């Protein structure tokens, strides 16, 4: 914000905000005090570390800084997303490829249409938003995919016994999985700007950008995120549900 700077001394007083949930945890015997304190310390430390890392990356040539950190973000996002489906064969390379290709395509479109310049301080933060939301959508899809195959095992077996193909017997599972992965983002789009101002828009306004210009940038990032979530959820579901069946079109249990 123009003319405003948070000093290290004033930042220390943020501890007041931590005391409130810690006190509530103690008062209601929730046994969360240590977790709250540790999570707060860890979060602050991570933010300071990433601040120094980004400062270093921004001083590098753009292609080096962008390539290095986007690669790190894609790998970390893949590791976190695949924890929800660790029993599914080839889940890591499939998820990694989907996230990487989605990021490359969206970044290429941003540059093609001139939404942002090819500079680390512009590409890295926005790419983080896209990759992060893609990670969440894939995690939700993998979790729901496994849940649906457990819940609907009997129906799938019955459909197969009547001559249905794996694709036909899994159609309802695929639909429910995609719906569960996409609904949070759809609901977010419905209330964007009404319930709360999005993070990027808020940051631009605090940085002195006019609200209308901030809205234009927010439209680009919000729709980019929506597309990435839809594509990632769809691809990971369509590609990975097949591993629940063997070459003889029989259902196999990979959730155990």
Image (cartoon, grey):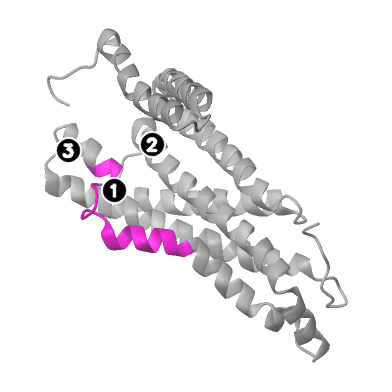
Residue 34 counted in the magenta span = no
Tag nearer the camera, 3 or 2: 3
Q: Determine whether, in the image, residue 210 is placed left or right of residue 129.
A: left
Q: Which residue is mark 2?
A: 125
**Which mark is on residue 205?**
3
Give the magenta part as a residue range. 182-201
Which quadrant would residue 166 be assigned to in this image?
bottom right
Which quadrant would residue 205 be assigned to in this image?
top left
In the image, what residue occupies the spot 36% across and 48% down?
A: 111
Mark 2 or mark 1: name the one nearer the start of the chain: 1
Mark 3 to mark 2 CA distance (whole Å): 16 Å
Query: Vertical placement of 125 versus 251: above or below?
Result: above
Q: Residue furthest top?
A: 9
Q: Which residue is mark 1?
A: 115
Residue 191 counted in the magenta span = yes
Crowding around mark 3 (Cα neighbors within 10 Å: few <14, some 14 to 19, many 20+) is some
The prevailing secondary structure element of the residues shown in magenta is helix
Mark 2 to mark 1 CA distance (whole Å): 14 Å
Residue 59 horizontal/vertical position (percent): 40, 20
- For label 2, the SS is helix
């Amino acid at each position: 914000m123009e003319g405003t700077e948070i000093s290290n001394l004033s930042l220390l007083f943020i501890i007041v905000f931590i005391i409130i949930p810690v006190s509530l945890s103690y008062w209601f015997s929730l046994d969360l005090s240590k977790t709250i304190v540790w999570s707060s310390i860890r979060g602050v430390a991570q933010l300071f570390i990433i601040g120094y890392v980004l400062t270093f990356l921004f001083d590098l040539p753009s292609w080096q800084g962008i390539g290095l950190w986007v690669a790190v973000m894609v790998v970390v996002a893949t590791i976190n997303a695949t924890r929800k489906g660790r029993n599914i064969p080839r889940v890591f390379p499939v998820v990694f490829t989907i996230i990487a290709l989605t990021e490359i395509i969206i970044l290429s479109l941003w540059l093609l249409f001139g939404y942002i310049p090819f500079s680390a301080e512009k590409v890295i933060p926005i790419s983080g938003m896209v990759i992060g939301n893609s990670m969440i959508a894939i995690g939700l899809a993998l979790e729901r995919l496994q849940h649906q195959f457990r819940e609907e095992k009997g129906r799938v077996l019955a459909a197969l016994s009547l001559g249905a193909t794996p694709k036909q017997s899994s159609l309802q599972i695929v639909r429910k999985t995609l719906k569960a992965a996409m609904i949070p983002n759809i609901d977010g789009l419905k209330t964007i700007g009404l319930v709360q101002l999005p993070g990027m828009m808020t940051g631009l306004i605090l940085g002195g950008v006019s609200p209308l210009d901030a809205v234009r940038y927010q439209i680009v990032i919000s729709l980019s995120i929506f597309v990435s979530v839809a594509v990632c959820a769809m691809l990971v579901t369509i590609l990975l549900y097949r591993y629940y069946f063997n070459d003889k079109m029989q259902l196999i249990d990979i959730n155990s």
